[in-house]
Image (tube, grey):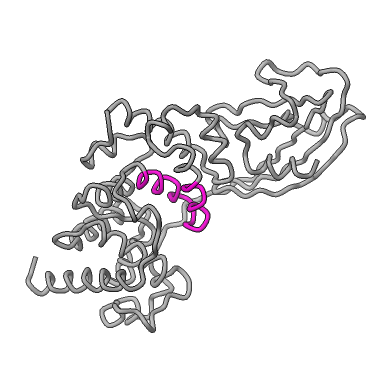
Amino acid sequence: MATKQVQKTTNFSLALMKWFRENGRELPWRETNDPYAIWLSEIILQQTQVKQGWAYWERFMQRWPTVEALANATEDEVLREWQGLGYYSRARNLHFAARQVVEMDGFPQTLEGIKSLKGVGDYTAAAIGSFAFGLPAAVVDGNVYRVLSRHFGIETPINTTEGKKAFQALAESLLPSSDYGTYNQAIMDFGAIQCTPQSPKCVVCPLQESCVALRNGKVNVLPIKVKTLKVKSRHLIYIYVRCQGMTAIHRRGVGDIWQGLYEPLLVNSEEQIVNSDMRLIAKGVRHVLTHQVITADFYLWKTEERPTLPDDYIWIKEEDIDNYGIPRLIDILLTKL
């Protein structure tokens, strides 16, 4: 690398770390080098804002303070504690990976070893590796993409193979000679606080003189992302069966949303709502997921005799439903009873 480029890279990294010392967020998982606490925070925050994820992290740490404790929990217990965070595959992967760590007699301390844990990709491995073990690994998440694309004026789409390789290589080249974890935290916080998606604080930005996007009027254009997401609509019809203080639920299977969570009786069409004892509680309740927009109808069926249901349904006491992990949509519907 040419001397001028080395100096430019050094100035960028030093400026970020100086900004971080003055403006960085104080987060509890940054006050420890415990890989379990750090890994837990990273999994929770993969699809969750810090404000919401913080409370879940504290609850998990209080209930399962060690990876061994989490490994000894049941999947149902973990899913129940996760309820409300969405993307439930994260919770299942978290539980599976906890058991992997126990089998390994402790957290792996190499990037490849960390990536062998279920649910851990390049970004999460780099975060855990640099924060917990001081490994020279660069994190690349949404915040990092935004900061790098704007500052260096990169117009390669971030969600293409070419873009991912280019940004990963650039991020690695920008790592300082030491204190990798602090630098990674600095660039992530810079994207979350300073170089935000909307209304970034360019006027008071310490990098404004060298920012290509600011100089060329492209702050609101970068980063570029190819639109590939197809959102489909879906209609679900639920019947809450109430029979002498009991209700029927079943566990959702693999290959669809909410795998492993529980729900009331699900029917395929309005034509199955033929019993006059069934009362409509809510209609067209809208629930938005990443790839789907769901509208749900919710019926109450009071009966003195248990109806014949498919074999995978179980009967539980109504008051015990809080002991089962349920999707956020079902939780919303149940409040309407």
The residue shown at (40%, 44%) is 40
Rendered location of residue 286, percent (x, y): 70, 49
Q: Is residue 43 left or right of residue 317?
A: left
Nearest the viewer among 264 and 222 is 264
- The answer to which quarter of the image holds residue 10 is bottom left
Taking the magenta stretch, the answer to whether it contains residue 314 is no
Q: Residue furthest right?
A: 276
Nearest the viewer among 223 and 206 is 206
Q: Which residues are magenta?
A: 37-58
- The answer to which quarter of the image holds residue 148 is bottom left
- The answer to which quarter of the image holds residue 322 is top right
Q: Is residue 44 above or below residue 220?
A: above
Q: Is residue 229 left or right of residue 146?
A: right
Nearest the viewer among 43 and 150 is 43
Rendered location of residue 72, percent (x, y): 43, 27
The residue shown at (57%, 26%) is 253
Q: Quadrant of the N terminus?
A: bottom left
Q: Is residue 257 above or below residue 38?
A: above
Q: Is residue 17 left or right of residue 197?
A: left
The residue shown at (78%, 39%) is 298
Rendered location of residue 259, percent (x, y): 55, 32
Q: Is residue 137 left or right of residue 305?
A: left
Q: Quadrant of the C terminus?
A: top right
Q: How many marks?
A: 0
The residue shown at (33%, 66%) is 155
Taking the magenta stretch, the answer to whether it contains residue 53 is yes
Nearest the viewer among 20 and 286 is 20
Q: What's the magenta bit mostly, secondary-structure-wise?
A: helix
Rendered location of residue 36, percent (x, y): 35, 41
